[in-house]
Image (spheres, coloured by chain):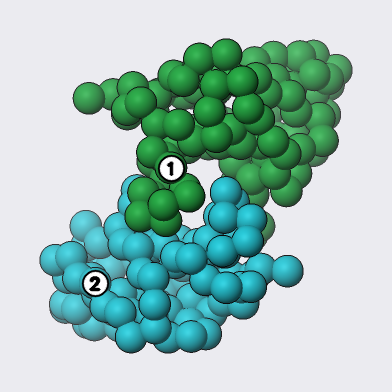
């Protein structure tokens, strides 16, 4: 049972480069989300999706794009990387946050450094 | 604006020395309060969900409680393997698709 799988685990980018962080879940969860975790700031929501074809912005969406073409996958795209995007990125999924009794399941993160 | 404040930032205990972690919150109607454990280099791992004041949940040496303004995570007779960062998050009735997280409490249990 893989749960939430994130790739890559580590990435170094130069300012201005673009890349895609991958996230896949095998639990048939309808809700998927991306968070970033920075020291002293806690986890902050970037984008989320409540189902295939539906995405919405979270607290810190600027500089990031998402799409949800399948239930399983929810990639996060950095369009033009900036040093301020150096962080640890977590993908999380849930059967449904609407119900309130289905917690988020997290992947093990992608540690991104932008130089 | 929904907010979560956790204290202390860090806590060092001796094995067997019980203590409590605090999570204070302000939210426009609480749908749920969540506790997670996070080990270094890993993603948060779900521990508990609490829904209403007075509710309690237990798992091994951990017990979570909830009031209208805060939640406590009580650790009874901790062991070194309980060392981790403990995160608290709230889900509001409005904007329920978003969880708001605290910055966590780093717990170190020494043998």
Residue named by callout 2: B57
Residue A81 occupies quadrant: top right
Residue B54 occupies quadrant: bottom left
Kindly indicate whether the residue at mark 1 contacts the one at mark 2 (C-beta within 8 angstroms).
no
Placement of A21 over or under B65, stated as above or below: above
Q: Secondary structure at mark 2?
A: strand
Residue A64 occupies quadrant: top right
Chain name for mark 2: B
Judging depth in this view, the residue of B84 and B56 nearest the camera is: B56
Q: Quadrant of the C terminus of chain A?
A: top right
Mark 1 crowdedness (10 Å alpha carbons): few <14, some 14-19, many ≥20: some
**Chain letter, cyan in picture:** B
Q: Is residue A1 visible?
A: yes
Q: Quadrant of the N terminus of chain A?
A: top left
Placement of A87 over or under B107, stated as above or below: above
Q: Is residue B6 visible?
A: no
Please name the residue shown 33% across and 22% down the image. A26
Please name the residue shown 57% across and 55% down the image. B96
Q: Position of residue A90 (x, y in %)?
A: 53, 36
Placement of A71 over or under B77, stated as above or below: above
Q: Position of residue B78 (x, y in %)?
A: 20, 72
Q: Position of residue A65 (x, y in %)?
A: 73, 24
Mark 2 crowdedness (10 Å alpha carbons): few <14, some 14-19, many ≥20: some
The colour with which the image depicts chain A is: green
Judging depth in this view, the residue of A109 and B50 nearest the camera is: B50
Chain name for mark 1: A
**Residue A96's disc number:** 1
């Amino acid at each position: 049972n893989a749960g939430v799988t994130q790739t890559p685990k580590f990435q170094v980018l130069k300012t201005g480069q673009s890349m895609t962080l991958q996230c896949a879940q095998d639990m048939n969860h309808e809700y998927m989300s991306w968070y970033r975790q920075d020291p002293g700031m806690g986890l902050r929501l970037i984008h989320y999706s409540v189902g295939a074809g539906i995405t919405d912005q979270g607290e810190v969406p600027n500089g990031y794009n998402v799409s949800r073409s399948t239930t399983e996958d929810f990639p996060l795209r950095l369009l033009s990387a900036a040093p301020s995007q150096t962080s640890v990125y977590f993908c999380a999924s849930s059967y449904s946050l609407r119900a309130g009794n289905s917690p988020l399941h997290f992947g093990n993160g992608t540690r991104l450094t932008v130089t | 604006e929904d907010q979560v404040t956790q204290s202390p930032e860090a806590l060092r205990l001796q094995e067997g020395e019980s203590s409590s972690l605090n999570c204070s919150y302000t939210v426009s109607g609480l749908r749920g309060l969540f506790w997670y454990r996070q080990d270094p280099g890993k993603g948060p791992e779900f521990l508990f969900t609490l829904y209403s004041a007075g509710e309690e949940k237990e798992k091994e040496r951990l017990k979570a409680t909830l009031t209208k303004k805060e939640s406590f995570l009580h650790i009874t007779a901790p062991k070194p393997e309980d060392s981790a960062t403990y995160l608290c998050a709230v889900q509001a009735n409005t904007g329920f698709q978003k969880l708001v997280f605290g910055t966590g409490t780093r717990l170190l249990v020494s043998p």
